[in-house]
C-alpha cells in the first residue's frame, strides 16, 4: 500500500480512456480532471487512513450472439484510478510467475501471438486430438475465497488484500437496486483480467504443466487466452482422460465446463490422412474468433487454415449495419466516412491473418453493399444507382482488405 502515492495515482489516471460511460455517481473523466490534484489528494488521504470504500458498479447489459445478454460493470472514475494502480502492482508481482502458455491481457502478448503458437504447435508437433473447452460464465462464477488464497501465494500485505476483496464484494446497481456479489469479478472493470489470469494460473496452467503434462506418454500442450483455451494431444486416450480430469478440477474451484461448447475432436496432419482414406472430413473448432480447419497446400501437403468464425463475421456485419442505419441522417457523409474507414481498418487489424483473405473480402463487399443501401435511404432525392455509387467510391475509397499478420 505504500505505493499508492499521489504521483503514482496521477500516472494511473492519465492512462484511463476518455469518453467512457460514467459510474453510478455520473462523474466523467473530464469532470474528475477539472479538480484533479484535490481529488487525487483526497483519495490518497482516504487510502492511507483506510477509509476508502469503492462504489458499486453500474450494471449494463450487452447482447450476445446466442440471444442472451452479457452483464458489464461500469466503475466510478475514482475507483478506476485505484483499480489501475492495483492492476499495475499485481502485474509487477505475478507477470514473472505466469507461464508462456498464457496470452490474455498480458504486456507484450496478444491474440495473434496465441494463434501463432497454436499454428506452430499443430504444424510441427504430433497433434492428433484437440480438446476445445469453454468455462461456463467464468467471470461471473470466480470463487472469491479461492481467488484470495491464490493472491496470498505472493502477497502478504493484508491492507492491499483487503482492498482487492472490497472490489470483489462491492456489488452492482441495476434498475435502482443494489445487488451484492458473493462470487465473480465484474466484466468491464480494469482489475478483472489480471485477477482472472492469477486465478487460472494456479487452477489451470500450473496444474496442467506440473500434474497432467508430466504424466503424459505422448505430446500435450495447453494454449490459453484469458478463460478461452485449447489443449492439443497426441493420444486419444490421454485427451479423453484430461477432459474428465478437467471437469473434476474446475468443479473443485467453483467452475464448470459449458457442456454444449466443449468437446474432443480428431485434428492434425495424421488424423487428416486417416480421414481422407475413409472418405471423411475432420471437425473444426473455434478459438479467438477464428474457425480452424485442416487444409492442404497447393502441392498436397498438410496445413492449418483459419477463417473468421461465422458468428463473429455476422456479428461484425450486424454492428456495421446498425451503425450505418443510425448515422445516415444524423451526420453528413464526410463526417461519418472516416469513422467507417477506421472500423474497416480495425477489423482487418484483428482478422487479417494469413489465409483469411476470403473472409476479409466478404466483410468488405458486404459492407460496401450496406453503404450503398443506406445512402439511398437517406431521402427521396440525391440517390445513387450502382454505377454512380461505384464511380463515387473510386474517388472516396474505403480501405481494402489486407493481411496484417503473417
Image (cartoon, rainbow, N blue to C red):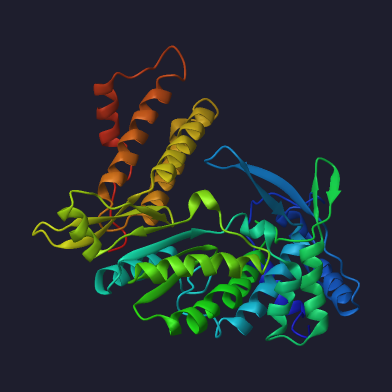
**Residue 319 rendering spot, x and y as whole percentages:** 49, 38
Front residue of 239/224: it is: 239
Q: Percent x, y for residue 282?
A: 28, 53
Q: Is residue 306 left or right of residue 148?
A: left
Would residue 231 be visible to someone looking at this image? no
Report if residue 8 is visible in the image: yes
- Quarter of the rendering containing residue 196: bottom right
Q: Foreground: 185 or 257?
A: 257
Instruction: Left or right? Give the position of 250 relative to 104.
Output: right
Name the residue at 51% across, 74% down.
Answer: 107
Please tell me which residue is depicted at 65% across the width and 59% down the height of the picture.
139
Compared to residue 138, the image places residue 106 above or below, namely below
Give the total of numbered labels: 0
Relative height, residue 303 to residue 70 (above, below): below
Position of the N terminus, as image quadrant, is bottom right
Question: Which of 68 and 316 lies nearest the eye of the viewer?
Answer: 68
Kindly identify the residue that appears in the image at 30 percent across and 71 percent down: 120
**Residue 129 place in picture, x, y as percent:** 34, 64
Q: Is residue 360 above or below residue 230?
A: above
Amino acid at each position: 500500500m505504500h505505493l499508492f502515492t499521489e504521483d503514482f495515482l496521477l500516472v494511473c489516471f492519465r492512462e484511463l480512456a476518455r469518453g467512457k460511460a460514467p459510474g453510478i455517481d455520473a462523474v466523467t473523466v473530464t469532470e474528475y480532471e477539472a479538480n484533479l490534484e484535490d481529488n487525487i489528494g483526497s483519495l490518497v488521504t482516504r487510502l492511507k487512513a483506510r477509509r476508502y470504500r469503492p462504489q458499486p458498479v453500474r450494471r449494463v447489459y450487452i447482447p450476445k450472439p446466442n440471444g442472451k445478454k452479457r452483464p458489464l460493470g461500469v466503475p466510478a472514475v475514482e475507483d478506476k484510478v485505484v483499480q489501475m494502480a492495483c492492476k499495475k502492482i499485481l502485474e509487477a508481482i505475478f507477470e514473472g510467475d505466469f507461464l508462456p502458455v498464457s496470452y490474455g491481457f498480458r504486456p507484450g502478448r496478444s491474440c495473434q501471438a496465441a494463434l501463432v503458437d497454436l499454428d506452430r504447435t499443430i504444424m510441427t508437433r504430433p497433434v492428433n486430438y484437440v480438446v476445445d473447452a469453454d468455462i461456463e460464465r467464468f467471470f461471473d462464477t470466480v470463487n472469491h475465497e479461492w481467488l484470495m488464497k491464490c493472491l496470498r501465494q505472493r502477497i502478504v500485505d493484508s491492507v492491499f488484500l483487503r482492498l482487492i476483496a472490497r472490489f470483489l464484494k462491492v456489488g452492482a446497481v441495476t434498475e435502482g437496486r443494489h445487488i451484492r456479489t458473493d462470487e465473480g469479478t465484474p466484466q468491464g472493470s480494469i482489475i478483472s483480467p489480471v485477477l482472472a489470469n492469477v486465478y487460472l494460473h494456479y487452477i489451470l496452467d500450473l496444474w496442467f504443466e506440473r500434474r497432467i503434462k508430466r504424466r503424459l506418454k505422448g505430446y500435450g500442450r495447453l494454449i490459453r487466452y484469458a478463460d478461452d483455451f485449447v489443449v492439443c494431444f497426441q493420444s486419444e486416450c490421454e485427451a479423453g482422460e484430461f477432459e474428465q480430469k478437467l471437469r473434476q478440477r474446475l468443479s473443485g474451484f467453483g467452475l464448470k465446463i459449458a457442456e454444449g461448447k466443449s468437446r474432443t475432436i480428431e485434428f492434425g496432419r495424421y488424423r487428416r490422412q486417416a480421414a481422407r482414406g475413409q472418405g471423411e472430413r475432420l471437425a473444426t473448432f473455434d478459438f479467438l474468433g477464428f474457425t480452424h480447419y485442416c487444409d492442404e497446400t497447393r502441392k498436397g501437403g498438410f496445413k492449418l487454415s483459419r477463417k473468421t468464425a461465422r458468428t463473429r463475421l455476422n456479428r461484425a456485419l450486424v454492428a456495421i449495419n446498425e451503425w450505418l442505419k443510425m448515422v445516415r441522417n444524423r451526420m453528413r457523409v464526410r463526417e461519418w466516412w472516416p469513422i467507417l474507414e477506421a472500423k474497416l481498418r480495425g477489423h482487418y487489424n484483428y482478422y487479417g491473418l494469413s489465409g483469411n483473405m476470403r473472409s476479409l473480402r466478404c466483410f468488405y463487399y458486404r459492407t460496401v453493399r450496406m453503404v450503398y443501401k443506406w445512402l439511398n435511404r437517406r431521402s427521396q432525392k440525391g440517390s445513387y444507382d450502382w454505377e454512380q455509387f461505384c464511380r463515387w467510391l473510386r474517388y472516396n475509397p474505403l480501405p481494402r482488405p489486407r493481411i496484417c499478420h503473417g
